[in-house]
Amino acid sequence: MINKINRIIFMGTPDFAVPSLQALLDHQENVVAAVTQPDRPKGRGRKLTPPPVKVLAENAGIPVLQPTKIKTEEYLDTIRELAPDLIIVTAYGRILPGPLLRLPPLGTINVHGSLLPRYRGAAPVQRSILHGDRETGITIMQMDEGMDTGDILLQDSLPITADDTSATLAAKMSRLGGRLLIEALELLRRDQLPPTRQDNHLATEAPPLSKEEAEIDWTRSAFAISCQIRGLDPWPLAHTEHEGQRLRLFSPSVIPGEPMEPPGTLCRIDRDGMMIAAGHDYLLIREVQREGANRMPVQAFLQGRPLKTGTRFGAK
């Protein structure tokens, strides 16, 4: 049997979803509609801003749906009238009801940002960095009503580098997701995409990030703090206390060594940045951002606010 995929509905919202939709367009797939979340206020002016998927879809002449509620008969009827053979979801941002998932003849598949069953949930890219993983990847899965519990259809991995932030890693993963999605469609058309059940004993969760995770505890290892800084960039951004204000830190590197200074002590300042003692090893910080200011190299920051070695960060 050859699976017919003539009509596709794509569901996605942020930048992470754009390469998946672009891959479908480049492959000349018939995307009959793009479903995305409503426009949201953004920036200091709180200007109503369309999601990236909407921008791409409209530029490509694809009808866009932005429902405020998706668990209604009215919405289900709208999708039914579009008669999709397959629904594809990439970072849509809402839990889809069972009747919608099962509506297309080929069901609904998802481009998920982890190697399932690891990191089921809303923040798999960030959690992989926060936990110090050296590898992550993309999973194409058949969606069911659970939280990323559906059968695995296809996977591919990529390394996490020591410089990766959540933003840079997400960009690489989104491009991989687009390529893997097209590969999955070709296999699905040939009926060569057998599902594999997830091993629930190996499952881990990836809950949404919170601002409470952003404060740096200098008694942790330099590696753990580096993962925190990179994993929380671009949101909510890791910070430490300095002179009664929050100082956000960026571009970290681990410097091996056993500190004699208390954790959080500024030990050295040079053209490379500032070296701070951690619970284990040292952390080199190259960029900072104080409250109400722009992100800048450490040397530019020091021109306006000189620091001395022996300064303690995190002390309130």
Image (tube, rainbow, N blue to C red):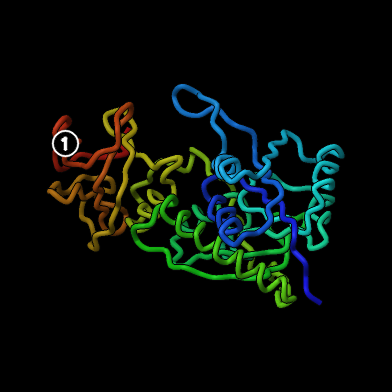
Q: Secondary structure at mark 1?
A: helix
Q: Position of residue 114 (x, y in %)?
A: 56, 62
The kind of residue on which mark 1 rests is Leu
What is the number of callouts on the image? 1
Picture residue at 84% right of the left edge, 50% below the top:
99
Nearest the viewer among 104 and 279 is 104
- Image quadrant where residue 191 sits: bottom right
Density class for disc 1 (Cα within 10 Å; few <14, some 14-19, many ≥20) is some
- On the rendered image, what quadrant is the N terminus found in? bottom right
Instruction: Give the residue pinned by disc 1.
Output: 302
Q: Is residue 110 above or below residue 157?
A: above
Q: Name the residue located 77 percent from the left edge and 40 percent from the top edge.
A: 70
Q: Observer-nearest residue: 221 or 145?
A: 145
Residue placed farthest to the top in the image?
Answer: 45
- Residue at point 19% right, 48% down? 273
Determine the image quadrant of residue 30: bottom right
